[in-house]
Structures are given as C-alpha cells and as structure tokens.
Image (spheres, rainbow, N blue to C red):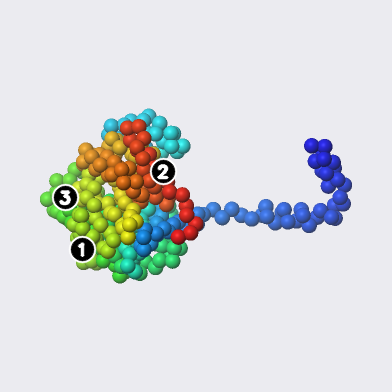
Amino acid sequence: MTDLTRRTAMVGAVSAAAIAPLVGATRASAASPPVGKQNGGWYRYKVGDAEVTVVTDGARSFPIPDGFIANAGKDDINKALEAAHQPKDKITLTFTPIVVNSGGKLYLIDTGYGEKAYTENKGIVGQLRNNLQAAGINPDSIDAVIISHYHGDHVDGLVLADGSPTFKNAEVLVPAVEHKFWMDDGEMSRAPKGRMEGLFKNNRRVFSGDILKRVRTYDWDKEVAPGITAIATPGHTLGHTSFVVSSGSSKVFVQSDVTNLPALFVRNPGWHANFDQVPDMAETTRRKTYDMLVAEKLMVQAFHYPFPSLAYVEKAGSGYRESLVPWNPTI
Ligand SMILES: [Zn+2]
C-alpha cells in the first residue's frame, strides 16, 4: 500500500510533456463508437462425416399473452422465467434452422421467417439469409429444404418478399401428414377463427406457385435424405416431425418444436402452450421424446433453445433440464 502510494506520487512528479502521448492514446480509444450490432450467428459441428451448420434467424420478444399456457397462469410463468434468470413478464423466442451437409449435398431444415419479416421487423427475425452468407453458404447452393411443420417461423422463409423461392435450386421436402392437413379445403373450412384460420391462410400463401411445384412429401420412419430420418412427433401440429441426423456411430436428434422455450416447457413438460394444436398429444410426444433422449444420452438440436441450440437433457423433478453443449472452437 505504501509502495503504491509512493509510485502514484512519483507519477505525479513526471513532467506534463512526458505523459502527454499517453493521454492522447487514452482519448483515441475513448472515441471508438459502440458497434451496436451483433456478429453473424452461425456455429458448426460434425456428426460423423456429416457437417451441421446452425444458423440463427433471430429472436422475438413479446409480453406474455393472455392464455399463453392453458394450465399455467402468469405467476407460474414468471416463476419459471425468474428461475432461469430471464426477465419477467415477457417471452423471448429464438429461431434456429440448421444446414446439414450430408454426402456433399446441403439440406436446410426449416427456414425462419424470411425476407418480408426481416424488413417489417427491422432485422430482428428473418436473418437466415444473411447469416448463411456469413457462414459461407450461398442460398442458391441449398439442394433441398426439409420442413418440420407448417408454422410461420419454420416455413415463411421459403419465399422472398415478392413470393419467389428464396432457395432457387432447392426441392421442398414436407411431411406427408402435415401437407395433407393444411392443403385440405374441408379442414380449412372447419378451422376455428383466429389463429388456426390465419395459419391456413398463411400456408396457402407460402405453398403456392413455384413452391408448390417443388414440393415432395416424405413419410415418417424413412430417410428424407441420406443420413436424415424423419421421426413422428405429432401434437404441436398433426404432422409435426423431428429428425435423426446420423453418420457412422454418431447422431443428433433434431427435435423441431417438441418443446418450445426450455425454461418453460422442458422444466414443465405438462404445460400446454396455445400454439400446440393438440395439447394432450403434444405432451405425450414431449414426455416420450425426452425420456428417450435421457435414456439414450442423445444430443438434441432444438429450434427454440438458446443459440446454438444444442444440448443434452436429463430428468429434473417432474420435468427435465437441458445442459447446453459448450462452444467448440474447432471442428
Ligand atoms: Zn416454432
């Protein structure tokens, strides 16, 4: 302490001329303006010989809507948010498509919100195309887009703002059960007003013209593409699909929306969110899938987990807990 005081006194004794350059340097760094924007959001890892690039489409925050969860109130939701060190009274959802390079071909699983939303929301969502470019992937080089289910955050990015295909050279591979439901005029006429009616309208907009011409349906329990197998996980929607990406002895489970925000729905798998089309079926699927992930110690890639949305899960109380996979600086 005495030494420190003496040195401070000695610095004070140095002439103003001697310390002038130092003062100048300090001023220069203080003048650096904050950058004010995030870097490109992508992360890469390998599954055997396959290479997975996780690409964020952005994130959206909104106040907890009334009736957001049928069997949990705002107090319960806030408690769960607080326990996960997240702000109260609002929900923040992230959106995370992936690109799988399997056998030299590029398969994009789900699309994010697309160009129209990017413009309308000032870039908070719809970032996929920019982040693909940042990851060195030209959207024109995508061979096929594989869709998990027909919700806007998963399909809207199929088209640009003018309605033309975003991925100019890609086939569009869709779950047969899902496609049949949303393209059925009878189902559309029976759809409740509001959210379901809006979804039908949106899906008929996206799945028209050039996109519809590129659609090829796939069945559950079969390979959609080499090393990518479709797994039935219905409930969130009737045709909701997950995937196992495998190569050699390695595999990852791509869960799509088996759970949404983990702080709420991994911890409380019995909570019924208003975006689950058949809530009881969604809960059954959720518990069955998570019990399997725990038993097999299988890594899960989850569309609505925090970026890069990759975790292992374990049992915790009456629910589960995700353990995020640490960033790997090499591949
Ligand atoms: Zn979703």
Crowd class of label 2 (few under 14; some 14 to 19; many from 20; radius 10 Å): few
Compared to residue 267, the image places residue 26 above or below, namely below
Q: Is residue 159 visible?
A: no
Secondary-structure class at tag 1? strand
Quarter that holds the N terminus: top right
Secondary-structure class at tag 3? helix
Q: Residue at x 22, y 63 (%)?
A: 215
Compared to residue 122, the image places residue 322 above or below, namely above
- The image shows residue 7 at horizontal and vertical percentages of 83, 44
Compared to residue 244, the image places residue 267 above or below, namely above
In depth, the one of 155 and 14 nearer the eye is 14
Write down the residue under mark 2: 323
Q: Determine the CA span between mark 2 and mark 3.
A: 40 Å
Write down the residue under mark 3: 188
Q: Image quadrant of residue 158? A: bottom left
Q: Determine the CA span between mark 2 and mark 1.
A: 36 Å
Q: Residue furthest front?
A: 249
- The image shows residue 90 at horizontal and vertical percentages of 41, 38
The kind of residue tagged 2 is Ser
Write down the residue under mark 1: 216
Q: Earlier in the sequence, mark 2 or mark 3?
A: 3
Q: Earlier in the sequence, mark 3 or mark 1?
A: 3
Compared to residue 214, the image places residue 125 above or below, namely above
